[in-house]
Image (cartoon, rainbow, N blue to C red):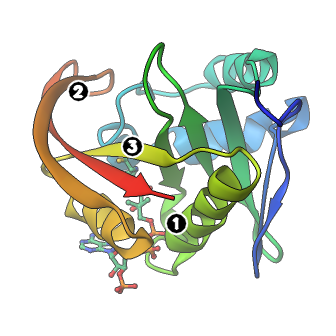
Amino acid sequence: MSVIERTPRIETADLTLRAPEARDAPRLAQLMNDLDIARMTSRIPHPYGIEDAEDFVVRARGVDPATDCNLLIEHEQWGVVGGLGLNTPPAAAPEVGYWIGKPWWGRGVASEALAGALAWAARDWRKRYVTAGHFADNPASGSVLIKAGFLYTGEVQWRPSLARGELVATRMMVWLA
Ligand SMILES: CC(C)(COP(=O)(O)OP(=O)(O)OC[C@H]1O[C@@H](n2cnc3c(N)ncnc32)[C@H](O)[C@@H]1OP(=O)(O)O)[C@@H](O)C(=O)NCCC(=O)NCCS
């Protein structure tokens, strides 16, 4: 049984990772309606409208916190700047995914958010390992994951990208708590 009964609130030096709320939908729709973000993810559609953001908030609040948590990344000065999810497929380990709004790329936000989420997953969620996969043409995400301590497993999976409408070679990684 998991020790976690509700979506966590994770604090780092400059960030709070927290459950999305209905009032976040307009900001999410604005930031996520960006092909440069969507095309690097499996599940973010493009274009991305307010209904997509509202659906995301409802779904994120409806998951079982023992297996899934979908969080917004809020910066203490800049407000909501991105999202990070830890989701557990049946009979598998949790897998992490994230995105940052383009105005804040290259400022260390993904690295700080991921470090905070992994520390929480190990300490409070009691997970022994976390997996991740990045599209082979997305070296930026590879750098984020390597910096966080992920290692390449050597496995390449062909995964769908909703925004591209095709399967994309995906390099799988693992992080041991
Ligand atoms: C990938 C993404 C999350 C990076 O977020 P970010 O906040 O800009 O990342 P950080 O600033 O923490 O950068 C972490 C490292 O990646 C490196 N990096 C960032 N952008 C890069 C790029 N375009 N190419 C190569 N390396 C890059 C940085 O140099 C940094 O390393 P350093 O600290 O040693 O310099 C962001 O670009 C994004 O949201 N992209 C679209 C969605 C996506 O790719 N999600 C991940 C799917 S697996």
State how far apart marks 3 and 2 are (Cα): 23 Å
Q: Amino acid at mark 2?
A: Arg
Between 45 and 5, the one lying in front of the other is: 5
Q: Amino acid at mark 3?
A: Thr
Q: Is mark 3 in CB contact (under 8 Å) with mark 2? A: no
Q: Which residue, given by chain and number where applicable, does mark 3 sit on? A: 131
Between 171 and 107, the one lying in front of the other is: 171
Which quadrant holds the N terminus? top right
Residue 40 appears in which quarter of the rendering?
A: top left
Residue at image x 72%, y 25%? 60
Q: Nearer the viewer, mark 3 or mark 2?
A: 3
Question: Residue 101, percent across and down?
Answer: 54, 57
Residue at image x 57%, y 72%? 109
**Lower sequence index among marks 2 and 1:** 1
Tell me the quadrant of ligand 1: bottom left
Question: Residue 19, percent across and down?
Answer: 82, 40
Local secondary structure at mark 2? loop
Q: Which residue, given by chain and number where applicable, does mark 2 sit on? A: 164
Dot 2 alpha-carbon crowd within 10 angstroms: few under 14, some 14 to 19, many 20 or more: some
Q: Which residue, given by chain and number where applicable, does mark 1 sit on? A: 110
**Lower sequence index among marks 3 and 2:** 3
Local secondary structure at mark 3? strand
